[in-house]
Amino acid sequence: MKSFRFLLLGLGMWLAAGPSARAEGLDDLRAREEKVKAIVQRVMPCVVAVTSADEDKPGSGSGVIISKDGLILTAAHVTQATGNNLTIIFPDGRRVKGTSLGANRTTDAGMARITEPGDWPFVEMGSSDLLKLGDWVIAMGHPGGYSFERRPPVRLGRVWRRDLDGALFTSCPLIGGDSGGPLFDLEGRVIGIHSSIHGSVEMNRHVAIDTLRFDWEKLAKDQTWGKVSFNSSNDSRPITGALFDRESRDGVVVKQVFEDLPASKAGLKSGDVVKKFDGEEVANFHAMQRLLGRRKPGDIVPLAVQRGDELVDLQLELGRRFFPRRDGQGNLPSDEPEAGPNVPFVPEAPGPRPWLGAAVELSADGPRLGLLSPEGPAAKAGLKPGDLLLKINGTAVKDATEVSDFLLALPPEATTTFELQREGQPLTLEVKLGKK
């Protein structure tokens, strides 16, 4: 079974997909390099600059053409900055006229169109829902960006996270001018659009192409809506109260239902397969998450679930992830309606986060330790690369994500018990977590 390595780092202990445990040979690297070169040569003519045609609106960014009649995908904040009248610049320096279309400010998806007649070069769209953590991707942007002497940027990286709103996060470095540019898979298909850019790769966010597809008709009809926010820890996000299999296909498998939360009250059971959510068919977890993101706590959502040979219809009243924040007088903010069943308040921990100082590899046997920071808490406690993680504080962990989720729930410097297997022998060690 192919394994991926997930680095447990500080500042949120984010999961970053790194090289697999099996070292790649020189021939593998050369083959990938040639594949990337071929893709870049093929798609480069379709990567454009999206700039303002108005002197009083100097905004600019990147975009990618996805149809022969000149339809362009870009970021909402690019078209909002550039205005309605656009100048589209090709990598060879050609300039043509264009116009902005719709924008979803919440997801940062934007659309524009070349207004001059012609058969324009274009690229194929892929499916972001089918991406897995660790998949290789290519980030590109227009050659100019904020510096007209900049060469066409091409950056290879991996998908390391996706948030509950469907956005992708990759290890591809991005800089100013890349906003709105395309993210490609290794078949040369667009699977994302560059959104927020930051000095840390943790903040390099891309609008997933399947999230953008969800709004296609509204964007094409020049509709603009939503508000700018890249905070994925939204207090008002609705919850279902169930754990789902993120890798399931042809429906979404329910892995666990938590007592006294919305899913349990609606009659959802472990093993159910959600076929329809809010009246829409759902092929996978990420499609369902997009539908969930368009609802608010307190909404009643119809479900159609497969339970054995029976198709069962349920009504799910969505809950609230957090209690709403109140002011000093106990009043709710005007944009925070009191709706839906609440769940226990779990505030986001401010300040330092826990740090293990080790990589965790996803192997066929379960989560194994990979590289350790020589001065990190794991190494100091006696943990070693290759140790198989069985339990943390008595709770079984089956993969790297569960390890990270469990540790993130602990305070920095907490003393933690790890039950391991080393060379077939059981071992228990205590680790005092660090903080970063």
Image: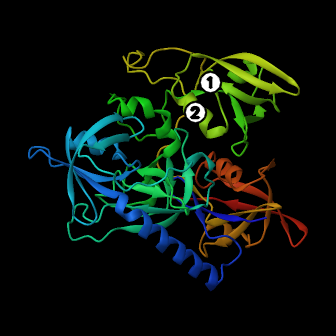
In the image, 43 versus 131, the foreground residue is: 43
In the image, 12 versus 274, the foreground residue is: 274
| In the image, farthest residue toward the left | 55
In the image, 5 versus 59, the foreground residue is: 59
Which residue matches tag 2? 346
Residue shown at 62% from the left, 24% from the top: 343
Q: Whole-percent x and y of residue 87?
A: 20, 50
Quadrant in the rendering for residue 429 = bottom right
Verify CB contact (< 8 Å) between mark 2 and mark 1. Answer: yes
SS state under label 2: loop
Residue shown at 21% from the left, 65% from the top: 147
Q: Is residue 311 above or below residue 168?
A: above
Q: Please state if 52 lies on the left or on the right of 289 as rendered.
A: left
Which residue matches tag 1? 343
Amino acid carrying label 1: it is Val
Q: Could you classify mark 2 by the number of other residues whose Cα lies within 10 Å: few (under 14), some (14-19), or many (20 or more)?
A: few
Amino acid carrying label 2: it is Val
Q: Is residue 397 above or below residue 379?
A: above
Residue shown at 72% from the left, 35% from the top: 251
Q: Whole-percent x and y of residue 346?
A: 58, 33
In the image, 371 versus 376, the foreground residue is: 371
Quadrant in the rendering for residue 79 = top left
